[in-house]
Image (cartoon, grey):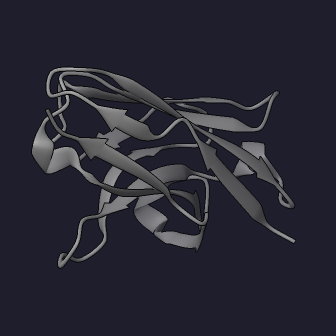
Amino acid sequence: QVQLVESGGGLVHPGGSLRLSCAASGFIFSYAAMGWYRQAPGKERELVAGIESTSRRKYYADSVKGRFTISRDNAEKMVYLEMNTLKPEDTAVYYCSRGRASDYTGGFISWGQGIQVTVSS
């Protein structure tokens, strides 16, 4: 059974930083691309960042380029999202996701339960 468990969310002031973590189990982690989605109230879920199984290629949405960094540890079956210079518009529920294949361009097929990130003064 695939499990993706997010942690590290919370409330932060504009300009602050947070690090999200995702613990994965139930599948061969080192074979799968991973990603982070987010969904703000009244908006569609969007892919924020993706990372190939080998970490060689990464994807970032234009809105987070230069501020967010995705990384993974295949030995620990963990994926991370380092978020810096946070803005109020980054407020959303963030979801860890498992790719269909080793490349994130293949799409995503599983999501965690989500974790709230709120950026507010």
Specify the quadrant that holds the C terminus. top left
**Res. 98 image quadrant:** bottom right
**Res. 76 image quadrant:** top right
Q: Which of 104 and 25 is in front in this view?
A: 25
Q: Is residue 1 above or below residue 35?
A: below
Instruction: Report the residue at 69% width, 57% height from top.
Output: 4
Specify the quadrant that holds the N terminus. bottom right
Is 71 left or right of 46, judged from the image as shown?
Answer: right
Instruction: Report the residue at 34% width, 59% height from top.
Output: 38
Q: Which of 107 and 44 is in front in this view?
A: 44
Instruction: Report the residue at 12% width, 49% height from top.
Output: 89
Is 72 left or right of 57, judged from the image as shown?
Answer: right
Q: Which of 53 and 89 is in front in this view?
A: 89
- In the orientation shown, which residue stands out farthest toward the front? 121
Q: Horizontal and vertical percent for residue 106?
A: 47, 67
Q: Horizontal and vertical percent for residue 57?
A: 42, 35
Q: In this view, does 73 lie above or below 30?
A: above
Instruction: Report the residue at 48% width, 51% height from top.
Output: 35
Q: In this orientation, does residue 63 appear?
A: no
Q: Horizontal and vertical percent for residue 30?
A: 75, 42
Q: Horizontal and vertical percent for residue 114?
A: 52, 61
**Res. 74 image quadrant:** top right
Q: In this orientation, does residue 74 appear?
A: yes
How many labels, in total?
0
